[in-house]
Image (cartoon, helix red, strand yellow):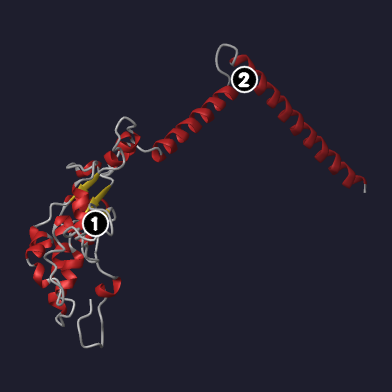
Amino acid sequence: MVKWAGKNQETLLCFLAVTILSSVSFLLFLDFLILGGRGGTTVVESVKLQFSSGWIASTHASTAATTPTVAESEKYYPFTRALASVENKSDPCGGKYIYVHDLPSRFNEDMLKECRSLSLWTNMCDFTTNGGLGPPLDNAEGVFSSTGWYATNQFTVDVIFGNRMKQYECLTRDSAIAAAVFVPFYAGFDVARYLWEQNVSTRDAASLDLVEWLTKTPEWTVMGGKDHFLVAGRITWDFRESVGFGIGLG
């Protein structure tokens, strides 16, 4: 028992000696840091500066990676000028400009030259005159006012609207500032010519030709045609593809 206690005492003394030497060494190290740092930046401050500069550098790199460049932020879109015109309060047409496609005559005027073929039962030639309004009504009995009344056919809205568009006060030849693009295609007259035609290829020829023509224009590529519009002066039934009736309705 005594011998075992002696060994424990030696171990304890060694442990105390090591602890004291470590403490002294640590104190001397701190004193060296303090004395050495009086003339300049301390080690602690140096560590802080390194951390700070590293954080700033990483933050800058992250910001540079996520912040768009000037070229990207000022990327040009084809409809930018059209949107900008809305903000121009001095322009009464700002945001209301309409660009009208100059279609080949086969899509509109040539159909009027063949007005007798636009209907199987009605001579449409008189109704397509006077901008689509038709001739003035005879008012021999004085039933209504002498002016402003016309023999207008229900299916001539293609011509009426197209003629009114020519008189629109905010037309533009610069499609880049246009809020919309009008397509003066006489779709109603086109379908009327072949309303009872069984040959689908014949009925659809002008429409497919128009699509091919439009998709090649720069105006179409701006929004894929979403800003284009037209008028079709027939009921929706006439434009449907009929199946199983044996006749070419629409």
Residue position marked by numbered label 2 in the rendering: 33
Q: Position of residue 201 (x, y in %)?
A: 14, 77
Q: Residues within 10 Å of mark 1 (few under 14, many from 20)?
A: some
Residue 180 in picture, x, y percent from top left: 27, 49
Left or right: residue 183 versus residue 21 is left
Q: In which quarter of the view is residue 240 placed?
A: bottom left
Relative to 58, say whether 223 is above or below. below
What is the residue that sits farthest to the right in this orientation? 1
Q: Secondary structure at mark 1?
A: loop
Answer few, some or many: residues within 10 Å of disc 2's Cα (few below 14, many 20 plus, some between 14 and 19): some
Asked which secondary structure carries label 2, the reply is helix
Residue 58 lies, with reference to residue 130, above or below; the image says above
- Count of labels shown? 2
Q: Quadrant of residue 247?
A: bottom left
* Mark 1 or 2, closer to the camera: 1
Nearest the eye: 178 or 136: 136
**Where does the image place residue 31, in percent across and percent down from the top left?**
67, 18
Amino acid at circle 2: Leu
Front-lying residue, 18 or 70: 70
From the viewer's perspective, is 17 left or right of 241?
right
**Which amino acid, by three-letter code, is at mark 1?**
Trp
- Residue 15 located left or right of residue 227: right
Q: Residue at x 10, y 72 (%)?
A: 117
**Residue 107 image offset from top left, x and y in percent:** 12, 62
Q: Quadrant of residue 48?
A: top right
Q: Pointer 1: what residue?
A: 149
Q: Which of the numbered marks, if any, corresponds to residue 202?
A: none
- Vertical relation: 203 (above or below) 232: below
Q: Is residue 224 visible?
A: no
User: Residue shown at 71%/30% (left/top)?
Assistant: 22
